[in-house]
Amino acid sequence: MRSKQMLLALLTLFVCSSLMCPSLMFAGTVSGKVTYTGTPARQKPIDMSKEPSCAKEHATPISTETVVTGANNALDNVVVYVSSGATDEGQVPTQAITYTQKGCQYIPHVLPMHVNQEFDIVNDDQTSHNIHPLPKVNTEWNKSQPPGTAPIKEKYDKPEFIEVKCNIHPWMHGWFVVLKTSHYDVSTGGGDFKLPNLPPGKYTITAWHEKYGAQTADVAISGNETKDVNFTFKATAY
Amino acid sequence: MNSLKPMRCIRAILFATIPGSAILGSAIVGLVFAAGLTARAFAQEAPEVGPLRPLVVKPMESHIGNITGHAADAKDDYRRYCAGCHGNYGDANGENAIWLDPKPRDFTIATFKCRSTPTGTLPTDEDIYNAIGRGFVNSNMPIWNVFTKQERADLVAYIKIFSPRWEKEKAGDPIKIPAEPPVTLESISHGKALFTKLECWKCHGPAGQGDGPSASTLTDSKDNPIRPYNFAAGGNDSRFKCGNTNQDIYKIFMTGVDGTPMPSFADVIQPNDAWDLVHFLRTLQVNRHGKENEVLMAAHGVIPPYVDKTPAPAAAPADNKSPGGGQ
């Protein structure tokens, strides 16, 4: 009876450590905040009067999202990712990611993904959109998606920062960020980001903003710890 | 470049007239040369002539029917007839390119407008062969009927040297086009309903005159302004960018015009519905004498509103398979 219990405990430990519980094993985390100094570019309200079905989705007109800021100089929509040091590059995450067109706006504005990770493009609007990403390295395509049609499933096979446009609604603007790593996050809701599950090692963390460019920071993880890394971008008004 | 030639003469004269004093000679030459360089630095840069970078003509081939094109054989034709706009390196930077609108194709990115293959895929050899022979209406690309079939096939092979995509990828599978059903008033009416539902009018305008609400904002993938096609312009012989047959129109919207705002509708239009759209688009070409306009004239120019009837018994099983189809 006792040996049986011990065997069970051992088995649990083995399974947990080897396969099931990577978060217990690699508890290293890099987290922090993205902020800006200076005056960020003023965002203009979008006139959607040419598309009434979208205009009525917004009680007050939404603004462009080139620079999205929060309280205490927080900078949102910054992609923070492990640009070197990760040992698990090439392991394509299986979780589904979705890029939604709602109210003639892309949600999220910036969609990070792993190379070859499949993602869905969904049209939640009562109007037709055309999804026209503009890659330079990957293959360019351009697809129409009228309301009520099935999600478009796509993936990119090379790392690249790709601008996304809808030609019918010229104000619509977003990004696909195709990365070699699955350790990525986007600063949202106050500039916060978090990169969990990092095994011990030395990493380079890159933060990229569509207007203010990229910054890097080096960080070493030595076990179950959380390292603070903060990025400060110099904002310009134009 | 031209300023070098007189300088060479001066150097030659100097050396010839003062043979004894080589040191003095070279000092003077140095001065003259330095002066020449300074003058050049202020002068306007001359346009690139001839390949300054080495250009490797890879042994690419094309296959059109029983003709095999070879890149090496098109070298002279390309330099003589194509490079002026498309550039020696196929990068759309020929010396005429800055004056052109729309811009010449950039072969280094291998994105092509007129294809029989799905959006994002390479065109077939025939697609490019036909594009060369057909020219591009409303652009500076003429009809290249001066070339023999063999010369055109060689040029198709030649433009493949500019992008590595041609070595890594195969051409896409051409889309399947079912036989064209007869033109009827009902087909035109259904096409009109699709034109409205798919919001073609957002760019092409309600009457296809290229004046939709988004028309003025359109740019191509290189950020140059671009116009949506105006169906109503032109006479009986007006052509589309990618051909002038009904099959060509079918292909244009089912494959998309890559590199431009025109998307592919392959995933959202059923093959038979697509023919109805073709028939309606023909009626937007108001000056064209064709079957579609004859049918419309017989109905006194009025397109009745489309009524979604129960599909005919023969078509029913196919329609049941695909929800959303046959609307």
Image (cartoon, coloured by chain):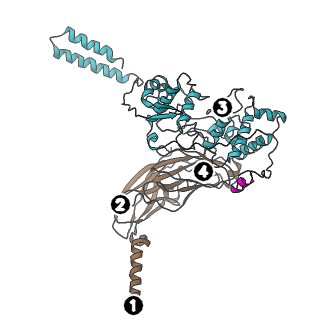
Chain colours: A brown, B cyan
Circle 3 or circle 4, nearest the eye: 3
Q: Is residue B306 magenta?
A: yes
On what subunit does the disc labeled 2 rest?
A
Q: Are marks 4 and 1 in contact (CB under 8 Å)?
A: no
Occupied quadrant, residue A22 = bottom left
What residue is shown at x 69% (from left), y 56% (from top)? B321
Q: Which mark is residue A2?
A: 1
- Left or right? Give the position of B258 relative to A116: right
- The residue wearing badge 4 is A63
Magenta stretch: give its range.
B303-327
Circle 4 or circle 1, nearest the eye: 1
Circle 2 or circle 1, nearest the eye: 1
- The residue wearing badge 3 is B244
Q: Are marks 3 and 4 in contact (CB under 8 Å)?
A: no
Q: Secondary structure at mark 3?
A: loop
Residue B44 x/y as whole percent: 41, 23
What residue occupies the far bottom of the structure in this picture?
A1
Label 3, residues with CA under 10 Å away: few <14, some 14-19, many ≥20: few
Query: Nearer the N terminus, badge 4 or badge 1?
Result: 1
Q: Is residue B271 magenta?
A: no
Pick whichever, B104 or B273, lies toward us. Answer: B273
Image height of A206 relative to B218, above or below? below
- The residue wearing badge 2 is A219
Residue B283 x/y as whole percent: 75, 35
- Kindly report the distance in space between the C-alpha atoms of the residues bearing marks 3 and 2: 62 Å
Image height of B147 relative to A2, above or below? above
Pick whichever, B21 or B177, lies toward us. Answer: B177
Amino acid type at mark 3: Asn
